[in-house]
């Protein structure tokens, strides 16, 4: 009986680990000719997909988002239907060698 409980626990643990979708920070940028209404629509869509906007840039058209992989995929699918396509890349330190 104890073996059955142990097996059940291990199976549920493996399923739970597989279902866990960690959050990551990404940089979403748009071309310079993107309208402010398209950018506003993108922000609404990322939040609707479950993402959180952490920072908005002043001089480039873009923002930093914290979201799960599933939320980012939903955002990419939703934005494929309208306007300019964003560039989505992991947020991290940038180094310039030279």
Image (spheres, grey):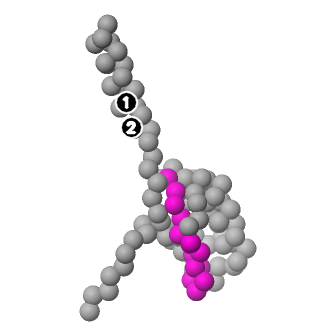
- Residue 37 forms part of the magenta stretch: no
State the image quarter where residue 48 is shown: bottom right
- Quick check: 18 above or below 57? above
Q: Residue at x 61, y 72 (%)?
A: 84
Q: Which residue is mark 1?
A: 13
Q: Residue at x 45, y 46 (%)?
A: 21
State the image quarter where residue 24 is shown: bottom left
Q: How many marks?
A: 2
> In the shown orientation, is residue 24 left or right of residue 38?
left
Q: Nearer the viewer, residue 7 or 89?
A: 7
Crowding at label 2, few (<14), some or many (≥20) Cα neighbours within 10 Å? few
Q: Nearer the viewer, residue 12 or 38?
A: 12
**Tag 1 secondary structure:** helix
- Quick check: 30 above or below 1? below
**Which region of the structure is painted magenta?**
55-68
Crowding at label 1, few (<14), some or many (≥20) Cα neighbours within 10 Å? few
Q: Which residue is mark 2?
A: 17
* Place of residue 44 in the rendered image (x, y in percent of width and height, measured from the top left): 68, 62
């Amino acid at each position: 009986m104890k073996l059955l409980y142990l097996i059940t626990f291990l199976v549920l643990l493996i399923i739970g680990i597989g279902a866990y979708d960690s959050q990551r920070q990404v940089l979403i940028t748009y071309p310079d000719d993107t309208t402010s209404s398209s950018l506003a629509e993108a922000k609404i869509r990322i939040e609707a997909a479950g993402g959180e906007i952490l920072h908005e840039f002043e001089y480039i058209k873009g923002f930093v988002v914290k979201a799960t992989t599933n939320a980012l995929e939903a955002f990419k699918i939703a934005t494929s239907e309208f306007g300019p396509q964003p560039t989505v890349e992991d947020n991290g330190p940038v180094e310039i060698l030279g």
